[in-house]
């Protein structure tokens, strides 16, 4: 069991911190207010090779794994970028690059990966649907064969980055649910280049993270060639798990990074702020919640790195999912407490945009809901780890 970083991993962490210094909270406050994509930040992480961390060297990437990606994400988030330090990388590197690296054909790898590695191709994933939500097996988007083409129809919701992505991973049914021999059969994955006239994209106004748009997406007789399918047909559910588990790890890292950013800003403020005689940072009522939250965040980080190690070493998806879900639950509970008390330390200033903590409060609360709710993560732990009866029917 090894806890120290390699020289390459330390280099990634150092580089991420240097990038974050160039994009401080004030930068993200402006991008959030103007609802602008952070072009300069995207170019910086692309030039640093972060968008290609998990892409093999033969396709222009670094040939590393989830552990290295999480290291970059946490340092970016914790040193000023908040959720943005994770968000941009998830959309393209996890949804796009990772899905293709793990399961794409050689032709698909050659087509997409070099562009992603250079930061010249952004990606998104069209998974969630209005009526299915967490119940992915209940999706209604269909992909039907017509000669040597696939014809896709359906509606998706909460598809982040779709407004500007050049590539999209589509999750659709290729066998109707009622005809499937088992519940997990009949889901397939497809790759498509954007824009496409058969795909309608409408941004959705939202509470936070407005430096990236989240959209409704509709497919209206979208025709794709046969080789747009990521094989095997009808077995896409198991391929999706290789995306959803890393997505969960990434959001756990976001919770950790956002929380540490808020904690550090609150500590700095508390050392100088005096209401009575002593600085408020000396008050145990403020120290203890931050100390407890920080300890829990470090525990979540260890579990998250174990999930990443298991993933990088091709351990079965159930064990990866177990640690990814446990890490997510702990990180979110600790993160919400950490940012809550950071806001409390700032007092009325914590409610103003000038001090940024209110933005981090909005960001940390998204992770309660996505990529899976706390309740569904707990249901997974209860059923698959503790061996208790399934707590919901499908």
Image (tube, grey):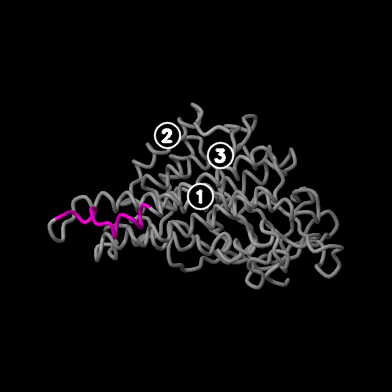
Q: Position of residue 283 (x, y in %)?
A: 24, 57
Q: Position of residue 58 (x, y in %)?
A: 65, 29
State the residue in front, 66 or 207: 66
User: Which quadrant does the N terminus fall into?
Assistant: top right
Against 170, residue 157 (above or below) is: below
Q: Earlier in the sequence, mark 3 or mark 1?
A: 3
Instruction: Please say whether residue 283 is one of the residues in the magenta stretch.
Output: yes
Q: Position of residue 146 (x, y in %)?
A: 83, 60
Residue furthest top in the image: 7
Q: Which residue is label 2 attached to?
A: 15
The Cα–Cα distance between marks 2 and 3, rounded to whole angstroms, is 15 Å
Magenta-colored span: 278-291
Against 178, residue 261 (above or below) is: above
Residue mark closest to the camera, 3 vs 1: 1
Q: Earlier in the sequence, mark 2 or mark 3?
A: 2
The Cα–Cα distance between marks 1 and 2, rounded to whole angstroms, is 23 Å
For residue 300, which numbered disc appears in the image?
1
Give the residue drawn at x 36%, y 58%.
289
For residue 67, which numbered disc appears in the image?
3
Give the residue drawn at x 58%, y 43%.
306
Residue mark closest to the camera, 1 vs 2: 1
Q: Is residue 76 left or right of residue 130?
A: left
């Amino acid at each position: 069991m090894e806890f120290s970083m390699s020289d390459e991993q330390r280099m990634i962490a150092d580089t991420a911190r240097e990038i974050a210094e160039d994009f401080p909270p004030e930068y993200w406050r402006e991008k959030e207010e103007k609802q602008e994509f952070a072009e300069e930040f995207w170019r910086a992480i692309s030039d640093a090779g972060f968008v290609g961390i998990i892409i093999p060297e033969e396709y222009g990437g670094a040939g590393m794994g989830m552990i290295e990606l999480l290291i970059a994400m946490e340092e970016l988030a914790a040193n000023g970028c908040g959720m943005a330090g994770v968000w941009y990388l998830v959309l393209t590197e996890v949804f796009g690059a990772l899905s293709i690296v793990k399961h794409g054909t050689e032709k698909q790898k050659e087509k997409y990966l070099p562009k992603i590695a250079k930061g010249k191709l952004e990606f998104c994933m069209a998974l969630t649907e209005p009526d299915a939500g967490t119940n992915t097996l209940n999706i209604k988007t269909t992909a039907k064969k017509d000669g040597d083409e696939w014809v896709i129809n359906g509606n998706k919701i909460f598809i982040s980055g779709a407004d500007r992505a050049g590539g999209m991973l589509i999750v659709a049914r290729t066998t109707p649910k009622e005809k499937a021999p088992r519940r997990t059969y009949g889901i397939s994955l497809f790759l498509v280049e954007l824009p496409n006239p058969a795909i309608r994209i409408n941004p959705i106004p939202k509470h936070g993270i407005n430096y990236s748009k989240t959209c409704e997406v509709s497919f209206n007789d979208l025709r794709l060639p046969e080789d747009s399918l990521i094989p095997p047909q009808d077995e896409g559910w198991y391929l999706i798990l290789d995306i959803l588990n890393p997505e969960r790890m990434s959001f756990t890292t976001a919770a950790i990074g956002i929380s540490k950013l808020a904690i550090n800003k609150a500590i700095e403020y508390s050392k100088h702020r005096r209401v009575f005689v002593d600085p408020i940072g000396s008050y145990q009522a403020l120290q203890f919640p931050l100390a407890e939250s920080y300890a829990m965040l470090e525990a979540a980080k260890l579990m998250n790195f174990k999930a990443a190690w298991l993933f990088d070493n091709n351990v079965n998806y159930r064990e990866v999912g177990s640690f990814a879900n446990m890490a997510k639950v702990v990180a979110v509970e600790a993160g919400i407490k950490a940012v809550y008390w950071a806001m409390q330390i700032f007092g009325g200033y914590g409610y103003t945009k000038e001090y940024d903590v209110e933005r981090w409060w909005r960001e940390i609360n998204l992770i309660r809901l996505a990529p899976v709710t706390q309740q569904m993560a707990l249901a997974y732990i209860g059923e698959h780890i503790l061996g208790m009866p399934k707590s919901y029917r499908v």
